[in-house]
Image (cartoon, coloured by chain):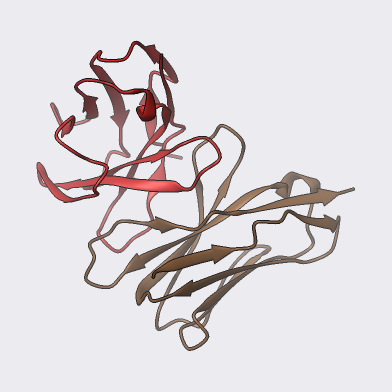
Amino acid sequence: SQKIEQNSEALNIQEGKTATLTCNYTNYSPAYLQWYRQDPGRGPVFLLLIRENEKEKRKERLKVTFDTTLKQSLFHITASQPADSATYLCALVLKAAGNKLTFGGGTRVLVKP
Amino acid sequence: EPEVTQTPSHQVTQMGQEVILRCVPISNHLYFYWYRQILGQKVEFLVSFYNNEISEKSEIFDDQFSVERPDGSNFTLKIRSTKLEDSAMYFCASSRAPDYEQYFGPGTRLTVT
């Protein structure tokens, strides 16, 4: 069966450290993958998009990698701040499946001062 | 910075009633989507819309659901006869092209009693 798995356990991290989140998928062939931030009761906020032919993307303190062999994307927040505390969602867009996003369950990040 | 807006922020309705959720996508975007998120669960795709037609819909999007772009700026989701299980956050999203990032609105919390 098809699965998108994100670590359901919260990630507690000290301010200033790097948070690394994983998104693993099985039985999918994604054309690209997007990462979103979601705060409680709010809509997902777009962060980064990475395509299947790209290995790495960066935006300010954020970095995402995409390994289609391992079927995994890693999302890094460097020099983390308490304001980075939120749930982070990965979402896949499959080849030949329109533009719909298929979401993982998200990983909650808590950055402690 | 342009944003997707949604109204109302919270809608309470009785089972069997019709509701219309409204969205104003980002002005130069051409692709529109509805997603929903039941409390504590993943964000789920409902429907995508382009050029005044439904491009794709999920199994959730049955005959009780419909979408419309009544004018050049609004995009609506109608649920004809609400059920208790329709209670969720409903998110509208838009993108400028089919393989570009999707921007989400703040959501409408629908409570069916």
Colour brown, chain: A
Q: Measuring from the top left, give residue A9's x and y in whole percent.
A: 71, 56
Task: Please state if A38 lies on the left or on the right of B67 as rendered.
Answer: right
Check the image and name the residue furthest to the bottom. A69
Task: Please state if B63 lies on the left or on the right of B8 as rendered.
Answer: left
Closer to the camera, B108 or A18?
A: B108
Which of the 4 quarters of the picture holds residue A20?
Answer: bottom right
Q: Is residue B74 visible?
A: no
Q: Measuring from the top left, give residue B54's x and y in whole percent.
A: 13, 46
Tell me the residue at 46%/84% (across/down): A68
Q: Is residue A70 visible?
A: yes
Which of the 4 quarters of the picture holds residue A92?
Answer: bottom left
Task: Please state if A22 lies on the left or on the right of B19 as rendered.
Answer: right
Tell me the residue at 65%/56% (across/down): A8
Q: Measuring from the top left, give residue B66's x and y in whole percent.
A: 16, 32
Closer to the camera, B30 or B56?
A: B56
| Count of numbered circles in the view | 0
Q: Where is the C terminus of chain B found, in terms of image quarters?
A: top left
Q: Measuring from the top left, give residue B35's x and y in whole percent.
A: 35, 42
Q: Colour of chain B?
A: red
Vertical relation: B112 (above or below) A30: above
Closer to the camera, A65 or B89?
A: B89
Task: Please state if A81 lies on the left or on the right of A107 as rendered.
Answer: right
Vertical relation: A26 (above or below) B65: below
